[in-house]
Image (spheres, coloured by chain):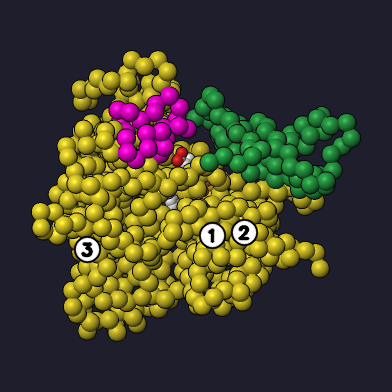
Amino acid sequence: MGEEQAESYLYKLEAVLEEGRLLTIVVIAQTDERAFTSAENNLLRHTIAPPRIKELSLVEKKPLGRQGVGYVVETSTFA
Amino acid sequence: MAERKQWKWAADPSLNKMEFTKLEKDGLDVIETIVNTYSKEGFASIESSDMDRFKWAGVYQQRPKDGHFMMRVRIPGGILSSEQARVLANIAADYGRDLVDVTTRQAVQFHWLTVESLADIFERLASAGLSSFESCGDCPRQIMGNPLAGIDPHEVLDTRPIVAELEKFFLLNRDFSNLPRKYKISVSANIHNAAHAQINDLAFTPAKKVIAGEEVIGFHVWVGGGLSAKPFLAKQLDVFVRPEDVVKVAAGVTTLYRDFGYRQKRTHARLKFLVADWGPEKFKEQLLELVGELEPGGIDLTAGWNGGYFYGIHEQRQAGLNYAGLSVPVGRMNARELNELARLADEYGDGTIGTCNTQNVLIRNIPEAKVAAFRNEPMIVNRFKLQPNTFVGYAVSCTGTEYCNLAIVETKERMRSLAQYLDDTVVLETPLRIHMIGCPNSCGQRQIADIGLQGALVKTADGMVEAFDIFVGGTLEEPQFNRKLNARITVDRLGPFLAQLITLYKVDRQEDEPYWRYVERVGLSHIQAQVDSILQPA
Ligand code: HEM
Ligand code: SF4
């Protein structure tokens, strides 16, 4: 059994942009801090003009230990 | 090791990985391995395939993952004796860093246990007629009940023997130790839905029916409730169950779940998925095929919902006797306090203690003559209050980052201090239930709160800051889960924000209108407008 530091998580983050749009970012990281950094890097890579982020938050994490963990990113609401 | 069962799903290649683990070795078999091997050879000797099975022994790795465990102990129906309480207190003192949590399912939870201590703990529990077995894992968990059973003026029959029978039937029963997923039962004959029927997999609520000219008191049956990321309210089956048939019906429902429940994906395995697919009609037909004819539903005897709260001194069904509902802020106490509770139960009551799904406790059977002295006990005056202030009294919290691997934020101490702040800031005479959770799994039952707070981390100029999403209007009175507002409040502003939101409600509401009903009346967009106005930079 490894140290907690060695465990990786699949993180779900949300970015609210200045113009009001909401983006969901999913990254693998070992700590919450690194999840934020990776999310920002991914946002940069994804856009030509740097996105104007109003708020970036981490909303969920799942241990990567089990194959197949993931997220459903809702763009509309389901029953 | 017991003989292996030949389960009918064993040959299905589409089973999820955990199902193969369970077929290889039943979860219950890990208990023997823990006692004979792991507790002697230590953490390093634990085989990784057994780590998941530890849940069947009622233990679960806690954060940080450095060899410590949490353990849940079953308190069937939420009633335990003072002797049992002392055994629990001593376990916490000897092995659990002096920490005792009362959970949202009336169980008791320890932290910081090592695998070396488990054999001794199992033995101590057994010596007191207690058990942690199957309190986690894919099996029948702690049975929720009415902690006032037997003394409750608002119950239509004493459910203690029924809960005891169910516990005896299911606990360590290898016919039901391999279910598709966790399985939660609730039994209460309290007319105020004390055991949260709609959020359990299987629930019994009070009902009556005239059968062959005779009025029979019994139960209605609910199936398929559950919270977590996609909550679902249980559906009522059109049957009436006599008290003596409860175990038979529970066995039938559990058999249906075992044999027809889904085992392909763990995220689609709870009973709620089968109930949603079949619908209550088909579920009922299948149930009757298994258990034989049952009467169609009778008259529902439930009238509203007490939220699981019992504060204060109240008269019992038995004249001259009283029960005392006490507040345990966010359910946490230490060994000394639990021992003290046991002493109070012995000295003033009949030696029984109730655990509530609101993370509180109660003492039963206090004679009228002793009430005044009881009120004056320092522990009651200073700690386990009979009339806690509104916010401390109606605050519920999950474990959070302190011990939980999935948590995004700290919750327990934060909920305690937030409630204290609100009590110091806002005067509100009626209950307002606030539940705080550290991630979407909802152990703290965020969905049924008047105001639910769910943790998130926000990146700011000063680094990561803990924050909470706000959900409003949850209740089991007219069952409805709370709904999300567009607001993520950082913790530095959480107290003042809630104080303002609650003050707006206080001004607007009709007499004694509970918050959930107020949300219902004014509408979510009205509350959102309140939120926007509070958050508007001055
Ligand atoms: C180490 C700490 C804990 C962990 C890792 C944990 C994990 C989880 C997970 C993963 C779920 C969602 C499972 C599902 O339904 O799919 C869950 C649900 C739940 N847990 Fe916990 N939990 C922890 C502590 C607690 C505590 C302290 C309580 C009680 C105060 C609690 C009570 C519950 C309840 C009531 C649910 C809701 C289940 C439902 O009705 O669907 N848990 N927990
Ligand atoms: S709600 Fe999330 S953070 Fe809280 S105890 Fe449950 S799993 Fe952990």
Give amino acid for label 1: Gly
Alpha carbon separation for disc pair 2 and 1: 9 Å
Residue B473: which numbered mark, if any? 1
How many C-alpha atoms fall within 10 Å of the one at disc 3: few (<14), some, or many (≥20)? many
Residue mark closest to the camera, 2 vs 3:
2
Q: Which stretch did the figure color magenta?
A: B257-282
On screen, residue A7 versus residue B8, left or right, reads right
Q: Position of residue A37 (x, y in %)?
A: 75, 37
Q: Are marks 2 and 3 in contact (CB under 8 Å)?
A: no
Q: Position of residue B349 (x, y in %)?
A: 23, 72
Tag 2 and tag 3 share a subunit: yes
Q: Quadrant of ligand 1?
A: top left
Residue B524: which numbered mark, if any? 2
- In this view, the residue in front, B240 or B394, is B240
On screen, residue B245 versus residue B54, left or right, reads left
Question: Which residue: 50% across, 57% down?
Answer: B474
Q: Are marks 2 and 1 in contact (CB under 8 Å)?
A: yes
Residue mark closest to the camera, 2 vs 1:
2
Q: Does any portion of residue B33 appear in the rendered image? A: no
